Image (cartoon, grey):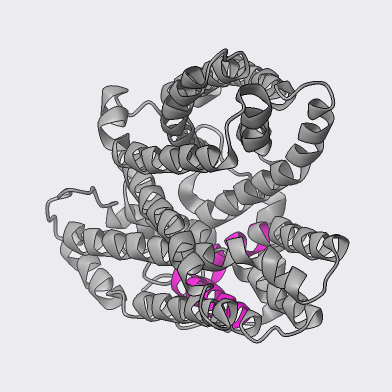
Amino acid sequence: MEEDGGRGAAASPGSSARFVRCLYAVGFLDLFGVSMVVPLMNLHIKSLGASPTVAGIIGSLYGIMQLFSSTFVGCWSDIVGRRYSLLTCILLSALGYFILGMSTTVYLFAISRVPVGIFKHTLSISKALLSDLVSERDRPLVMGRFNAASSVGFILGPVVGGYLTELKDGFYQTSFICASIFLLNAGLVWMLPWSEENTGNGKHKQGKKRTDSITAKPNYDLQLKSVTNGTVAIDSPFQSPWVQIVTVLKRIKEIACSDLWDIFLVRLLMSVTILLYHSNFSLALEERFGVKPLFSGYLMSYSSSLGVLAGCLLGPITRLYQHNTYRLLLHSSTFTCTLILLYASALSIWMVILSSTFLAFSTTIGRTCIIDLELTIGGNEASGTLLGVGQSVTSVGRIIAPLLSGIAQEFSPCGPPSLAVGLALVAILIMNVNKQKYCSSGNVKLKNQ
């Protein structure tokens, strides 16, 4: 079987659908476990006696590790296979949260963030595996549902974590439960029907029907990708580390030399746009309308719930657009820009609620579409690498956005959303200038492929 079952996994529609449903559960459990712990971490490190500066440095180091590791881990998953890389990332992340559960000193707390910072890329690899499993036509629908399942976990996790932290040694118990959830996730990945998927390849070769509820990729296409990628067989994931490192660096060079800069620039601009919108949301509502932080919290939870609904509705929306991802991304980005402008100029809290309602839909659709466009134009042959680079680009946005937000707030509480509107307009302009490339998707491939 080529690679890890992920590459050869989608030939049989029935087995492909089983895989996809299991990966929805993986995404849910991942963010459910993480969101139980993350909101409590600042309180815990403060209780250990760390100064705000030390806490900030540890948080920044985690972000920097994510920035550099996402590209390498994504590319590594293309080389050694999805199964092996996914299991490795989940188990080492579980180790990090286990150490966090024993962190009685700031030093142990900092150490616990290292394996998580480097290997917490479960969602990226899962998305790459989903991309391997389904056809390009069904990819936005499946990605939207995966994001929706993950978001449900992110909504429920803080509620459970907040309850557990009220107990004696609540933070430590919550961390151990989080580590246990990651171990459960690893078991789920291990028990996925990889061998069934391999059997499905042979059945599909003989001409079985292509589609059920999810369209499977043709077996010939998967075999061709394995050859094109130079991927390794599943029985050799422990090949020489030097060979793996050289191959990873070669893949990253191919991405750097490809004509994908505009796609990643659009992703960066729209990421910073959304981050600026959220950066001072509670503070701005308090200063502009006198509402309490509790109301802001309810409004953000309301928006998150609508985001889940938007992920589930991506199927009908993409069919409405006749699966034209570029046009859907352009319209959603334009709508996002208009709604943030409405929020920045809102004269009443009802206008804020209205803009937040529709922003939940436009931002969810936009995030899914930009990923789909990366894979469509960049070529699905290196989906792990492309998704890893995309995550690195988003991490750069997370570093830039707080700085830009702070500067913009010096002028007005509406400064960050106003700046966000300008950045969104630049992204829309770039998409219009490169319209021909997007419309003829697939003509921009990585070099040497």
Frontmost residue, 216 versus 272 = 272
The residue at the point 41 percent across, 75 percent down is 185
Quadrant in which residue 64 is drawn = bottom right
Is any part of residue 262 visible from this angle? Answer: no
State which quadrant residue 290 falls in.
top right
Where is residue 74? Give x, y as percent: 58, 60
Query: Which quadrant is the N terminus positioned in?
Result: bottom left
- The structure residue drawn at horizontal position 47% and vertical position 41%, both measured from the top left corner, is 298
Q: Whole-percent x and y of residue 360?
A: 44, 33
81 part of magenta stretch: yes
Left or right of residue 187, residue 228 in this image: right
Q: Is residue 221 above or below residue 144?
A: below
Residue at 73% over, 77% down: 109
Q: Give 280 or 17, whichever is nearer the viewer.
A: 280
Q: Position of residue 168 (x, y in %)?
A: 55, 83
Span of residues in magenta: 71-97
- Chief secondary structure of the magenta span? helix
For the question of whether residue 132 can be seen, the reply is yes
Task: Please state which of residues 190 and 172 is positioned toward the viewer in this rendering.
Answer: 172
Task: State the residue in front, 130 or 285.
Answer: 285
Tally of marks: 0
Residue at 64 percent of width and 31 percent of height: 286
